[in-house]
Image: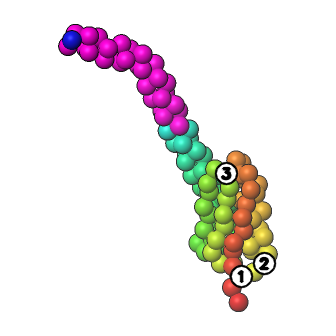
Amino acid sequence: MKSQFAASLVALGVALAPVAGHAADKTGDTTIERAKEIIDDSTITTKIKAGFAADKAVSALNISVDTKKGVVRLTGTAKSKDEADKAAAIAKNAAGVSSVKNDIQIRK
């Protein structure tokens, strides 16, 4: 009786091993893809902030950049609408950006 039970468990384990392996591969791929996504988003954010720093018309200190899956969100304050528009243009022109949400407030 014990040997039949043990044999059944071994057979079940053999049958489920490929399924477990496949699930492990999918989890690994998802983790790797997510890590690449985070790196890509960080690279986009860094490029945009560098663009702000290089442009005297845009304050790199007062405008924040948040990137998720290539979508950039700009927040913070600008001295004028021109500064906010320039920051959005710099963001839109950065490689890897799919869209820009400009939530920059104009200081009065």
Which label sits on residue 106?
Answer: 1
> Residue 76, image x and y in percent?
63, 75
Mark 3 crowd level (few <14, some 14–19, many ≥20, 10 Å Cα): many
Q: Amino acid at mark 1?
A: Ile
Per the image, label 2 sits on a secondary structure element best described as helix
On the image, numbered disc 3 is attached to which residue? 70
Residue drawn at 79 percent across, 75 percent down:
82
Q: Earlier in the sequence, mark 3 or mark 1?
A: 3
Q: CA distance from mark 1 to mark 2?
A: 6 Å
Per the image, label 1 sits on a secondary structure element best described as strand
Mark 1 crowd level (few <14, some 14–19, many ≥20, 10 Å Cα): some
CB under 8 Å between callouts 1 and 2? yes
Against 10, residue 86 (above or below) is: below
CB under 8 Å between callouts 3 and 1? no
Work out which quarter of the rendered image holds the C terminus and state it.
bottom right
Asked whether residue 13 is drawn in magenta, I would say: yes
Work out which quarter of the rendered image holds the N terminus and state it.
top left
Which is more toward the observer, 16 or 47? 16
Q: Nearer the viewer, mark 3 or mark 1?
A: 3
Q: Amino acid at mark 2?
A: Lys
Q: CA distance from mark 2 to mark 3?
A: 24 Å
On the image, numbered disc 2 is attached to which residue? 81
Q: Nearer the viewer, mark 2 or mark 3?
A: 3
Q: Quarter-wise, where is residue 88 in the image?
A: bottom right
